[in-house]
Image (tube, coloured by chain):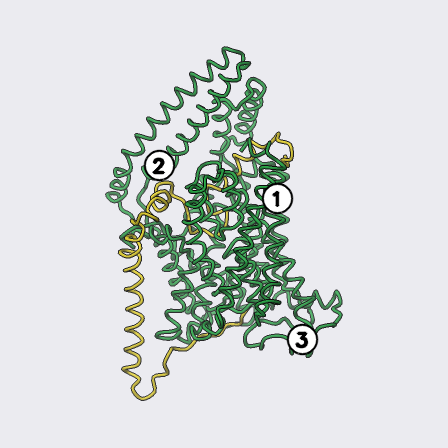
Chain colours: A green, B yellow
Amino acid sequence: MSDMAQTMPPESDVVIDVAESKLSDLWTKEDYWAIWLGLFILIFGMFVYFNAPPENMDSKIAEANAIMEKEMERAPFKTIAWHEAAESKHKLKSYSTGFGKFLNVFTSKPHGWTDNPLQSFFLNEEAAAAKNAAAMAKYEAAQAASAGALAVATSRQSAAAAANFKNETLNAEAKDSISAWIGAQNKVSDLKKKVTVKPYNQAGYLVGLGVIIALLFGAGLKVMGKPLPEFLKAFVLVFALAIVAYMLSSQAAAKAYGIGYAAWAIAIGLLISNTIGTPSWIKPAVQTEFYIKTGLVLLGAEILFGKILSIGLPGIFVAWVVTPIVLVTTYQFGQKILKIESKTLNMVISADMSVCGVSAAIATASACRAKKEELTLAVGLSLVFTSIMMIVMPAFIKAVGMPEVLGGAWMGGTIDATGAVAAAGAFLGEKALYTAATIKMIQNILIGGIAFCVAIYWCTRVDCVPGQKVHASEIWHRFPKFVIGFIGASILFSTIYASMGPDVGYALIDQGILKGMTKNLRGWFFCLAFISIGLATDFRELKGYFKGGKPLILYFCGQSFNLALTLLMAYIMFYLVFPDITALI
Amino acid sequence: METNRCAGPVSSGSGSGGIARLKRWAILVACILATFFFLLVLGPMGLETETLKPMADFIEEHNIEANAYYYTEVDEFFEAERHMRDHLGLAPGSAD
């Protein structure tokens, strides 16, 4: 431990687990408490959502699958009946019924708004009616277009059926018109949300949610020997600031620029700490570590390994081969060429840039115990580059006439932020969206493996003097234990999902526990963590990390390499090795 | 990651504590006003420019969560996954 201390940052800056383990760690260490709290929430969520499936779920799925199978035997393309059956399955969502629905509303973030911040929390009958009326004309036009497209598709499909589906021209015409109808349907479904706005009062739920979160973390802190009343008092302000961060991120312009709650939360915290100063009475609720680790355990449940297979081998090559290569190369470039002093800063920026932005930065920062300023810097860089790439990449791809699938794969593999990938992909076209989103989803799932590998690497190679042999027991002592909860949740939910099958898994997990509850709570925990980071950061310290512009150079060079390698790999995989798959997208 | 430390204010204040405190509050209020100026005036103006307008309109019209951090927060990802599963199931090299 004394040797280790020479190579590590001062204890005041990082959390260092003492190199020994005791049974009492299970209830006295924050890492374990993050696991217990995460596990408690997941078990509660499973109890709620798995016990209240959508009405007649099994029979509806069986009926839809029977229709789809029959239609696939009947025609060489996916017919109207096939699509209707598929849609009926996708309407099965466990979070939209009963107590699951209540939990979703209860844990939700503030609503979107454009010019009146109060609409984040309240919307009366009149305002809701005005919103619905404003969007009604577009909705009705979209409905009419969809009905027209359905009529054309029905007629062309009948023509193809009359020729026993033997005429390739008629089949192709029917297939194209069905695709056009699906596109029109999607537009109707987007606009439907704008004409079915209901009045709401989120303020009461937010108070209740704050109480529940305070009690959860308060219980953990109490057992760990921290004073509960002081925490509860301070938590009121920290949670209020988290609400403000979410409110700002829900504003229309903030969304369009891709500025999420993490950036707002850090900015709010920094603003307070660097102007009027963070009052000392808030300190008990500035629990960055505890919030972030518990959020990561919940994030583990969203890392479902079965989804890796969604786009077949080309997607796996683009996301799972390019990403680790770029990560390792960028890290080595930072160490050997740029000679960045802080290995943790180097790693967090490399992961943030090569994997999937903020969520990857959070996971790796926790796994390698980076400083809060380093995570802040990575989030800031990601925000700037994401906003630029979200606009520039689709424009460039359109300008050079790049095929949609290639463009989508390129954007999915390189734009950091997940939401920005969806926006840029959808803007380019449907095929681009499907490819970009699937590649990014596979990258999202890579976070678990990356965080685990980084934690192991740090335990065995970084947090020790050169040449020191690290024994297995020592690795265990140093290993950030919350990672076990993170990976464990991922394995548990991946297994349950696989055993349920894609249809039930979609209804009960994707559109049940994850969408209805854990995704929301995870967001709140991360938001609280970023508020805490801002409140505990001196802006002048942050400036020091930017010395010589090295983080910017690292990000820029790494991203340039990422852009080149991803484009090359996407071209090889989607156009040279697996053109058959590309044709089907 | 880091332990919990709280940053102090920019200036310690000293003798002219009242003025220094007032200055710090003034900076805070100015920053809050600047934020709302960005969100309500400058930001929307920028989104009206030729470069940004098409993307901004598209995001608004399709309700895309462009500032989301993980795939479970964005509906388009589930749509994409379903599409891929439905269309690639029998393709050579696909994983299904």
| Same chain letter for marks 1 and 2 | yes
Left or right of A487: which side holds A438?
left
Disc 3: host chain: A
| Same chain letter for marks 2 and 3 | yes
Q: Residue sitting at 27 percent across and 55 percent down? A: B40
Determine the residue located farthest toward the bottom in the rendered image. Answer: B15
The numbered dot on residue A183 is none
Disc 2/disc 3 C-alpha distance (Å): 58 Å
Callout 3 secondary element: helix
The numbered dot on residue A316 is 1
Disc 1: host chain: A
Q: Which residue is mark 3?
A: A4
Q: Residue sitting at 48 percent across and 70 percent down? A: A546
Q: Is residue A100 above or below residue A341?
A: above
Q: Position of residue A390 (x, y in %)?
A: 43, 49
Tell me, yes or no, if residue B22 can be seen here.
yes
Tell me, yes or no, if residue B80 can be seen here.
no
What amino acid is labelled 1 in the image?
Answer: Ile
